[in-house]
Amino acid sequence: MAVPGGFANTRSVLSIHPVRNGIISIHRQTRSQEELFSRSLTCPLRVKTAWEVEAAVDKNYYNTRGMNGRSVNNGGCSFCGTRNVRQQSGCGCQNNNGDSLLRKIQEIDFAIYETVLYLDVYPCSSEALAYYHTLICEKEALAKEYESKIGPISAFGNRDRSSWNWVKKPWPWEYSAN
Amino acid sequence: MWVYEKKLQFPVKIKNPDAHAASVIISQLGGPDGELAASMRYLNQRYSMPYGEVIGILTDVGTEELAHLEIVGAILYQLTKGLPEDEIAKSPLAQYFVDHTAGIYPASAAGVPFDMKYVGIKGDTLADLNEDLAAEQKARVTYDNILRLVDDPDIKEPIKYLREREIVHYQRFGDAIRITQDNLDSKNFYAFNPSFDLGCNANVFKRQG
């Protein structure tokens, strides 16, 4: 039962993004996905993408300029050619030392975290729950690949039996680790 | 418990050190509306919350704020790495440098060390959630101000990301207040502390079957 006043009409934000659009376009949700969510949500809520809120809050930060102040290249990232990804200096595609795998994990972890926050307050959303399970499935495979090729993500994941790589690889705040 | 993951939530790759930028961005490490204050606020507010949904969002947002603390730390680390002494001397970072060198010490841009006085924990669901909503907006404004003071796109990208997160967290805390009010007894017109609202707790038990 709603109590007078307060946040009964709070505009809710569903900012889950398609994983392949990448961390750079985090709030650019495809139309079909947005519709999928708004149709299936059983909670009484008004779905809005965070991108829509953002655009209303401040168009200048996001819509007119690409990364590094260059105009947005609609053909995709100039480094890796991935469509729907804005170019940026640290996208990782320019390196071949496994950074792009790290970027994929960062992207999917972001999507998982967004879904987790959403599910915390909309636990009856079966669609969000299904999306969550798709994501963690994909994450498990990526994490396995990363830990065998590059190094442990957490101290529980040192897969190399002959070396304690946890302390050998660069730490996240290093330029080279990004 | 918590387990550390050895990666940033959002990449930080700053090519040019910048003492002026570091001297203002440090406020989001240990300032009144910084990431450390945010994390301490949410994680310590959890214990008096009566609903699983609200405890869940405080846990997960509080944890994400720790990831943001590390992003701000990485920005500061890269901004001060290899900075020539003469550049430090003529920047506002000189006063920080004399005490902390290039160490990362949680303080505000004005040099005030981090203080739990920034954080409100009242033990009252609605008081605490309203504090959280205000905190997210204040952090968002601080990021807006940083974006006004900084030019380098390498610095601005992670700052813009952090600013966006404040907006999303604000929405989630709004949802948490809605959940709380939905659980209150309708006779509890002024939405008193649900921990002491017997009718409200009866509703929760009914809901849980």
Image (cartoon, coloured by chain):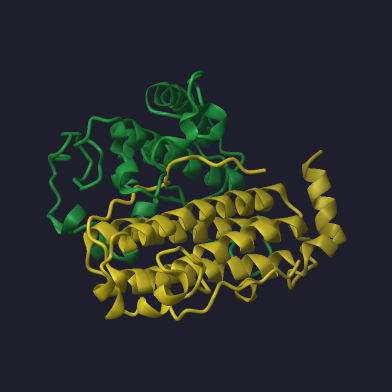
Chain colours: A green, B yellow
Residue in the foreground of this view, choosing between B128 and B114: B114
Q: Can residue A30 be seen by looking at this rendering?
A: yes
Quadrant of the rendered structure where residue B142 is?
Answer: bottom left
Instruction: In the rendered view, tell whether residue A160 sits above or below residue A167.
Output: above
Q: Residue at x 23, y 55 (%)?
A: B15
Instruction: In the rendered view, tell whether residue B153 sits above or below residue B121.
Output: above
> Picture coordinates of residue B186 (x, y %)?
76, 63
Q: Residue at x 45, y 71 (%)?
A: B27
Does B9 sit left or right of A26 as displayed? right
Q: Residue at x 34, y 53 (%)?
A: A51
> Picture coordinates of residue B119 (x, y %)?
63, 71
Residue in the foreground of this view, choosing between A173 and B40: A173
Quadrant of the rendered structure where residue B194 is?
Answer: bottom right
Does B82 sit left or right of A158 as displayed? left
Quadrant containing the C terminus of chain B in the rendered view: top right
Q: Residue at x 83, y 54 (%)?
A: B201
> Picture coordinates of residue B45 (x, y %)?
69, 61
Instruction: In the rendered view, tell whether residue B15 sits above or below residue A37.
Output: below
Q: Seen from this angle, which residue lies furthest top?
A: A161
> Picture coordinates of residue A20 (x, y %)?
31, 33
Residue in the foreground of this view, choosing between B99 and A176: B99
